[in-house]
Amino acid sequence: MNEETELLLRQFIPEARDLLDQAGRSLLALEREPGGAEPLNELFRAVHTLKGTSGLFAVEPLTRLVHAAEDLLFAVQAGRLALDAELADALLDSLDQVGVWIDSLAEASVLPDDADAASRLKVTKLRAALGDGDGASDSGSSRDLAASGALPAWLAGLTCDPQAGSAGLLAVRYSPDAHCFFRGEDPLGLIRQIPGLRALRLDAVEAWPPLAEIDPFVCNIQLRAIVDAPRGAVEQLLRYALDQVEIIALPPGWPDVPATPSGTPDGDRRSDEFHSGDTAVLALLEGQRRLLRAAGEPETAIGRRAAAARALRGVLAFTGRDDLTAGLDSACAASEQSGGAGPLLRCIDAIAAALMIATPLRAAPALSAAAPSGPPPFAPGADIAAQRAPGGSESRSLAAASPPATLRVEQGKIDLLMNLVGELVVAKNAIAYLARRAEQGQLSTGELAREIKDRHALVNRIAEDMQVAVMSVRMLPVEQIFQRFPRLIRDVSRRLGKRVELVVEGGETAADKNIIEALADPLIHMVRNSLDHGIEMPDIRKRGGKPEHGTLWLKAVQDNDEVFIRVIDDGRGIDPAAVRRKAVEQGLIEPERAQALSDEEAVALVFAPGFSTASEVSDLSGRGVGMDVVRAAVEKVGGRVSISSRVGIGTTVELALPLSMAVTRIMTVCCGERLFGVPMAMVVETVRVRRASIHRFRDREAFVLRDSVVPALRLAKLLELPEELAAPEEEAILVVRVNGERLGLVVGAFCEGMEAIVKPMEGVLADARAFSGTTLLGDGRVLLVLDLRGLVA
Amino acid sequence: MPIRYVDGDEPCAFLDGRVIAEDAEAFLEWLRRTYDPAVDLRSCTDPHTALMQLLLGARVRIVQLPSDPMLAGCLADNDSKVPR
């Protein structure tokens, strides 16, 4: 692939992903609202655009599949086909496949090796849904005989000399669109360039209008040809028109072995073909008559007679009238001798008469094998291969959830950053100027300090503005992860036989990119849990007096510097007694303690590592890795998760996430001579407590804060630092909230708060549990930021 | 001149070599105003699709078929409709 194509491909990949997303959304919208014109149009547009753009690259299997989908949608749009759940499944499956291919293109710039076979299978399936006897079903795309099992009807009337080694013959049908002349195309010229052209026919698409009404620039021609050339060469030659071209591999020996492999069940369609075969045969005979009668140069007459004889042999083979071959042979010989067409013309009359009287078409042995009825043929194994392994579609939608590498940003945000950089450069220049003046001794120390403070204020403002601007670049709407759920819910609920409606609220709520991305997996767990354990089967719901279809809400709201995401279902709820029992059974908690828990606390046991309520492991959830994974993932990005549930009414899981991770507000504290940072989000308050008021119970300490007992831990002890020798009269205690509980952290002294970009610990320090990261202080020192959860665990 | 028109008692158009799409319009004009037109395709090697469809659609009397048997074959049996 050359550099230019590579560049184009880079552009194509995100665009294709967008189009696939769009198509998926529209498809789901269509399922909710069957016959909706707007989603159908959007779906069609997305698929159409994808097909068009993919044509730029050497991704023929992809283009072919998308084309088949487009044909299908075209039929739906025209009202010839109803979009039911099966069809939607097939389309979604195809879109998934395309998604997988796009990923492969993104990684390796080529489709996987099995793409061609996979494409054929899926195309066959889509085309089968379209059914036959319908013009659009055959248009475009190449099909293999092996995949379809029958020769298409349009082959009727096409023939060529079978003797001249007809192994690997291809039949080509090219249906140029009406306006192709305006694009400078010459379909005939193109077809005639195919090497090994063995037969060619031009047919009118619409009946010819009277001479006065013919528009010479509207193409009304369909071209059909038999060629003896490799498929690749034909596709290469017709590459700009592949969507209008159909290429069929003919069986070896064609046209001597005309129709189906015996035993292929394909009833209705076959008889249609016979009918068209009848008329086509007669038309073919008439054509030979006119070919022989037409005036022409004597030297071409021999060729024309030979062509007619070949066509007649084809007719006899097709109709199974081998008894007439002898007559034809002698007529050929007679024509050869006399140099006239008379004997052949008489032979044609004889053949026509024989066919008319006996109507022997249906008696032809090769053709009578057609079974009375049956579904359109599939490639062997197509169904099996197309069936998803359990969890297949889901794992695929999960795979699709892998974060895109690029970030799209509004132009305006970048412009704002640009302006700020401009201001920064001006401010920087001013400092150089100030330094020169200081050097020259023009300024007193006091003046210099004031000037520096001025400049600092200016740079500070710019830095703050830039921070805000960069933050806003990193902010993404939660819609980005929400939009995957309609599909997930559809697939899962269909598999479970449940009916679920999804309501999304607050999709526009924005949060930092990292948080959004970290949220995807926990959310999928939560939603799956709700579908699997929460929402009941329709009949149970009905008996319980609930609407048959369950409802799942995904809500996002912003509150101060936190984003709350709630997953709410109106299912059976969580039974605290069952949770207690299970937790005890699984050895997660002592029986006495379990009984002592309040109902809310018992329900929160679902977050305990290893907890699972499902009595049997389903392929969806309930493998024992569920809610504790959710909690771990959420806490990793500095969020909290909580659950509340009422039996028979439903469950709400709430995630509280920091709005941003990029800039963290930090409180610095002293411990001996060292400084440490504590994320401000964890700090509840700072208090000074008289040493005497700290009570000691064995090796534990606690103090009373506004009538409640708060345990106290000494930071120096936790970090194994030397205790301060001179015990102060009053201890400085940082009250923090860790895992939902208040905790006093005895520190040396409180220092200032600051905003910082905390970098995670890397390399050999990555495992240091007590610290979440580092940042730089104004004087260049490194500040270690404490990970309080790791510290007190 | 790819198309030479000879009007008279036996009007005939002689197509020569490569005939391009733009020639189709003039050719159609000629067909419309000519009584019982005929064409001679003997030396026509590369007729554009637009020309071919006029020859087929207008059912022009062909006095000489092209020398390429493929082209000749296309023009010889042109009255069948597209099979479905």
Image (cartoon, rainbow, N blue to C red):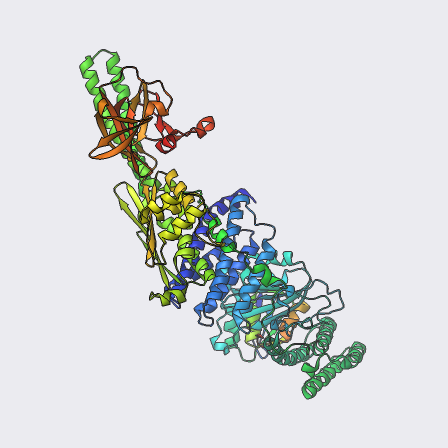
Left or right relative to A480: residue B9? right
Residue sitting farthest toward the top: A441
Q: Which residue appears farthest toward the front when viewing the image?
A: A592
**Residue A230 in picture, x, y percent from top left:** 67, 58
Using the image as rendered, state which of residue A115 and residue A194 is in the foreground. A115
Among the 4 quarters of the image, the one containing residue A545: bottom left
Judge whether A130 appears above or below A17 on screen: below
Q: Position of residue A677 (x, y in %)?
A: 32, 27
Q: Is residue A353 left or right of residue A682?
A: right
Residue visible at 49% across and 60% down? A183
Residue A374, by quadrant, is bottom right
Image quarter where the C terminus of chain A lies is top left
Q: How many marks overall?
A: 0
Q: Nearer the viewer, residue A653 or A192?
A: A653
> Which residue is located at x 78 percent, y 80 percent?
A331
Q: Quadrant of residue A364?
A: bottom right
Eyeballing the image, is A752 above or below A269?
above
Q: Position of residue A135 (x, y in %)?
A: 53, 71
In depth, the one of A563 and A123 nearer the eye is: A563
Q: Is residue A379 visible?
A: yes
Place of residue A246 in the rendered image (x, y in percent of width and height, measured from the top left): 59, 64
Residue toward you, A176 or B14: A176
Residue A570 in the image: above or below residue A700: below
Task: Confirm whether residue A73 shows in the render.
Answer: no
Identify the image quadrant of the N terminus of chain A. top right
